[in-house]
Amino acid sequence: SYSGPSGDEILAKRKEYLSPSIMHFYNSPLNVVEGKKQYLFDENGRRYLDAFGGIATVCCGHCHPDVVAAIVEQTKRLQHSTVLYLNHAVADFAEALASKMPGDLKVVFFTNSGTEANELAMMIARLYTGCHDIISVRNSYHGNASGTMGATAQINPDPYRGLFGSDGPKYARDVQDIINFGTSGNVAAFISEAIQGVGGIVELAPGYLSAAYESVRKAGGLCIADEVQSGFARTGSNFWGFEAHGVQPDIVTMAKGIGNGIPLGAVVTTPEVAKVLTRRSYFNTFGGNPVCTAAGSAVLKVIEKEKLQENAFVVGSHLKERLKALKDKYEVIGDVRGQGFMLGVELVTDRELKTPAKEETLHVMDQMKDLGVLIGKGGYYGNVFRITPPLCFTKEDADFLVDAMDYTLSRM
Ligand code: PMP
C-alpha cells in the first residue's frame, strides 16, 4: 500500500519547483505509484489499463521481472562510464542489437535518449557527406535539441489530410524540389519515422519513402530511419518500421522501448559510415553504460521469449478491426490507422471538412481514464488518440479499451 504524498501535494510541488512549461494529461492528473505488465496503479490502488505507455519507454510491460533482474544484478556489480574501459554488458548488447538489423547495419553507438541518437546520426551524416542540409518531414518529431528541431520540414505524405492522398511518389517530389531549389544539389541526410508518432500516428503514403530515399541518395545524402517509436516489434509485421516500406536505411536511430524504461538510445550504421567518427571525437559519459545495456539485452530476450512481435501483430490487427467498426458507428471518428500496436484514431466534427474535434478528444480521454483506460493523444491539432500499449497487451485488453471508447462515445 502507498503512504506517500497525494496527487494534489505532488501537483503543488510540481507547480512551485518544476518547469512551468511541462504539461500533464487529464483535468485531474493521475498519480501513478506502481506498474505491472500492461497496468498502472494510482495512489488508491486503482488499476488502469495502460494503452499508451508502451511508446513512452515500456515495451515488455511495466517492471518486467527479467528486465528488473538484469538491471538489479548489473547495478550491484558495476555501474560506471565504460567509454574508457571494457565491459561485456555493453559489447554483448551491441552484438545482439546488430543481429536484429538487416544488411550491413552493424556498428552501434550508444546514447542516453532519442534526441541524442538523432543529433549524433545527423552529425555522422554531415561528416560523411561533407554537406550540411538535413531534410525531414513536416509533422515529424525527432528530438528537442538544435539540430533535431532545425531540420527542414517537407510536405507530409499524410494519406488522410495530405494534398495527394495516398500517392507517395507525388509527395516525394517535394523532397526532389527542395534538393533542386533549396540546396547546392548535395545534402547530408534525409530523416523520417516509418509511422509518425507524436505527429498523430501518420502512416506515410505508400511509395513515399523509397522515392524520397532515391532522390536523397542521388544528391549524395544518407537516409536515416528514426525507429524511436516504430522499432522493437511495435508494428507487428516487422521488427523495424522501415521494413514495411521496402527500404534499407544507412543509419537507424532508436530509444524509448529499447531499455523498457531505462534511459538508453542507439545509432546503428554501416562500418563504412561509422568510420567518419574517427575524424571527430564523440564522447558520451553514460551512453550505453552497463546497467542500461544489461536492460537492453534483457528486453531483446523477452521480446523473443514471449513472442511479443507476433502478439503485436495478432492483437494489434484485432484492435484495429474493432476500432474501424467504431468508425462505422460514430461520425466523430474520421480515421483509424496504424499498424500493430501503433494505432491512431482521429476525431473530427465534420467528416467532409475534417475539422479537428479537439475538445471531444480531451473529453473522451478523460472519460476513458475514469473507466480505467489510459490512451494518449497527438497530431498537429491534438485530435488523434494514440494507442500504443506495452507489447504484452491482450485481446481482452483490446476489447475492454474499445468497449470503454464505445460507451464514452455513445454518451456524448
Ligand atoms: N524520435 C521520435 C520518433 C520520438 O517520438 C521521440 C520522443 N517522442 C524522439 C525521437 C526523442 O526522444 P527522447 O525524448 O528520448 O529524446
Image (cartoon, grey):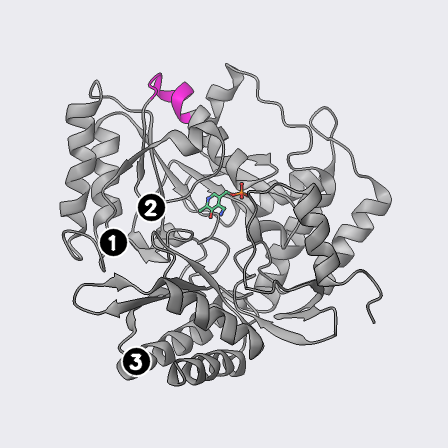
Amino acid type, residue under disc 3 in the picture = Tyr
Does residue 107 show up? no
Q: Does label 2 or label 1 sit earlier along the sequence?
A: 2
Q: Quadrant of the C terminus?
A: bottom left
Q: Is residue 159 left or right of residue 86?
A: left
Q: Is residue 390 magenta?
A: no
The magenta stretch is 125-132
Q: Is residue 5 left or right of residue 29?
A: right
Quarter of image, res 111: top right
Does residue 84 show up? yes
Near-viewer residue (336 or 277): 336
Q: Quick one: label 3, few (<14), some, or many (20+) residues within 10 Å?
A: few
Q: Which residue is mark 3?
A: 330
Checking the image for residue 158, the label placed there is 1
Q: Is residue 70 above or below residue 65?
A: above
Q: Main secondary structure of the magenta part?
A: helix
Regarding mark 1 in the picture, which secondary structure is present there? loop
Residue occupying image coordinates x 43% and y 53%: 240
